[in-house]
Amino acid sequence: MFDLTTRDIKYLSGVGPRRASVLNKELGIYSLHDLLYYFPYKYVDRSRIYYIHEIDGTMPYIQLKGEVLGFETVGEGRQRRLIAHFSDGTGVVDLVWFQGIKYLVGKYKIHREYIVFGKPSVFNGRINIAHPDIDEVSEMKLSSIGLQPYYNTTEKMKRAFLNSHAIEKMMGTVVEQLNEPLPETLSPSILVEHHLMPLSEALVNIHFPANPDALRKAQYRLKFEELFYVQLNILRYARERQQRYRGYIFEKVGDVFNTFYAKNLPFSLTGAQKRVLKEIRKDVGSGKQMNRLLQGDVGSGKTLVALMSMLIALDNGFQACMMAPTEILANQHYGTICELLYGMNIRVELLTGSVKGKKRENILSDLQSGAVKILIGTHAVIEDTVSFSSLGLVVIDEQHRFGVAQRARLWTKNVQPPHVLVMTATPIPRTLAMTLYGDLDVSVIDELPPGRKPVTTIHQYDNRRESLYRSVHKQVEEGRQIYIVYPLIKESEKIDLKNLEEGYLHVCEEFPECKVCKVHGKMKTAEKDEQMRLFVSGEAQIMVATTVIEVGVNVPNASVMIIENAERFGLSQLHQLRGRVGRGADQSYCILVTSYKLAEETRKRLEIMVRTNDGFEIAEADLKLRGPGDLEGTQQSGVAFDLKIADLSRDGQLLQHVRRIAESIIDNDPTGILPDNEILWRQLKALRKTNVNWASIS
């Protein structure tokens, strides 16, 4: 058998030790197998001329030969574009330009023959090609290689003469050496039932496609396999966990819960909160270990649901703990929970890195004896020194992802693993949730508590400051508070801080009657806390800040959020910031201030923000615009595996399809003994070994 994983890349003709070292460092390519699985990002077909009637919106780059029938300009201002109607006698396509319109109008002549090269797409039911290359017919040279692959390369690679063409040559050498088919990685029944191309054929056609149809089939086969194993891994792991771990059975809802419900509940629960509590009660009473993800927008009342779940644990003789990603948030949860439980005889303690000495010792010993009923803290609570007398429920508030591996550490805190409830305020699109949190059941709080009005969002250009400040003066006169947020980005930190300082001075001048405070991440903690306190207590009317305030500050009286340079923020981040206002009963406003010059994609982002307050719609749009790698909350942690060819923003339907297939395999073969599936379990085992990141999922 030809085993590519054991063939070192440096022995491939034309590579050698120096280039191999660059490939190792830049792309993580060590073996011929790694190289074969480094896929092109686009293809260019210069081998033939297509007829217009043959093409559709899914094809790669292609060439057409024909003439321009006429030009027209459409739209106004930034939306203005030039359209040329181009025909070869078999149909018409639109050639579209968004820039350089003046220069183009005289350049191409009507009814003269041209060669057009570009990527077709469909807009309003018509095929168009944006910013095509156009050549005179006399300059045309047909290439002999069909669809030519293009590979992503880095600056360091280019310096070592490893450009896209060099990688293409290396691929050609590997493909020539494949004298026999590679061992198949999917079972015969899956290949037949889902009409998938065999592995060797798919790998050859992904690099050197015979034609566009072969390329489509190769891409489908490789995406299918990649997403299928991600889902099989998660689902098998979840099934093993259900079988291996029994959950504590919380049989009753008793005095603690009922007293809280009757006397301390600040307002009646929304329908969504009641529904989620029912789902949680069903889990904790079932004998299975609960692993549930609670999604809800900022301000939807997740903390209250989490607290009521903890009270059910207390009613059944267990302790509960809540983990937050930062000390500020842990402190805030501690404050909120103590306030909600006021007058009830329940001991709640806070454990963070800054709790030291005697105080820490007391908390740790009282946890062990069971005197502390609810512990709130940062990740410090999963350290080995912290032990409970009977931990029954853990709530994880994850502003950023807290992986399966860390969740697993919690399970060692007791004889049986406690029930786990993970809360997130970043609405995660379904496709991403299935992949990041595939081992969790999902509950969603999709209603705001009574009395909350949706925030009105307005997009304003920065040349209209006067009217903006007039409305701010009005809000201040009515006794409201205002946030003004500036971007702070690592690459341009110095300039950004300068902008914030200048903005702060400008605001002080503009609002002499107000106390203005400022907060950014570079300040000392004590200074920052003091400035925050001024705003929270209402002594300061305006807070000038960076995105430090995105997480968790709760000021019901703040009714206006002004975001400067809003074009520099991602959608999820804008949505998180907007969630800081609208926490009281007053109508609140979020004002996105940008310069007049905006890229098309940025304009789309801002339009979505103005149109909707729905976090899920925003997250879906963010996933489509930016791709999963950049999504708030996944960037910091990395999606737990690298997808080489599938794209969660575009392949959502395929992901759901393969998940159903993986589910049926696990249902029909729970112990993994059917001969037809042997190849699947073997491949899954191999993947878990080779790709470090698979381990963090399981």
Image (cartoon, rainbow, N blue to C red):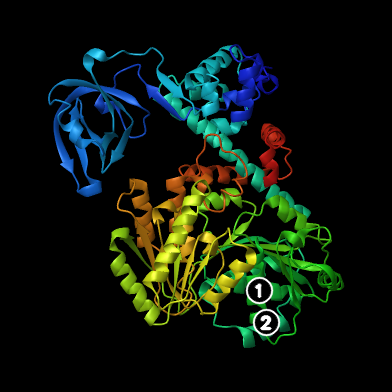
Residue 341 bears which disc, if any?
A: 2
Q: Amino acid at mark 1?
A: Leu
Q: Please tell me whether mark 1 sits on a helix, a strand or a loop.
A: helix
Kindly report the distance in space between the C-alpha atoms of the residues bearing marks 1 and 2. Answer: 9 Å
Q: Earlier in the sequence, mark 1 or mark 2?
A: 1
Instruction: From this view, report whether residue 586 is shown above or below residue 69.
Output: below
Image coordinates for residue 289, horizontal then vertical, percent: 72, 61
Image coordinates for residue 666, horizontal then vertical, percent: 66, 45
Image side of residue 146 versus residue 382, left or right: left
Instruction: From this view, report whether residue 47 is shown above or below residue 97.
Output: above
Image side of residue 277 versus residue 298, left or right: right
**Could you tell me if residue 665 is visible in this image?**
no
**Nearest the eye: 287 or 615:** 615
**Nearest the eye: 353 or 463:** 463
Residue 548 bears which disc, if any?
A: none
Instruction: From this view, report whether residue 310 is shown above or below residue 145.
Output: below
Image coordinates for residue 92, horizontal then vertical, percent: 20, 31
Q: Amino acid at mark 2?
A: Leu
Q: Please tell me whether mark 2 sits on a helix, a strand or a loop.
A: loop
Residue 307 bears which disc, if any?
A: 1
Q: Residues within 10 Å of mark 1 (few under 14, many from 20)?
A: many
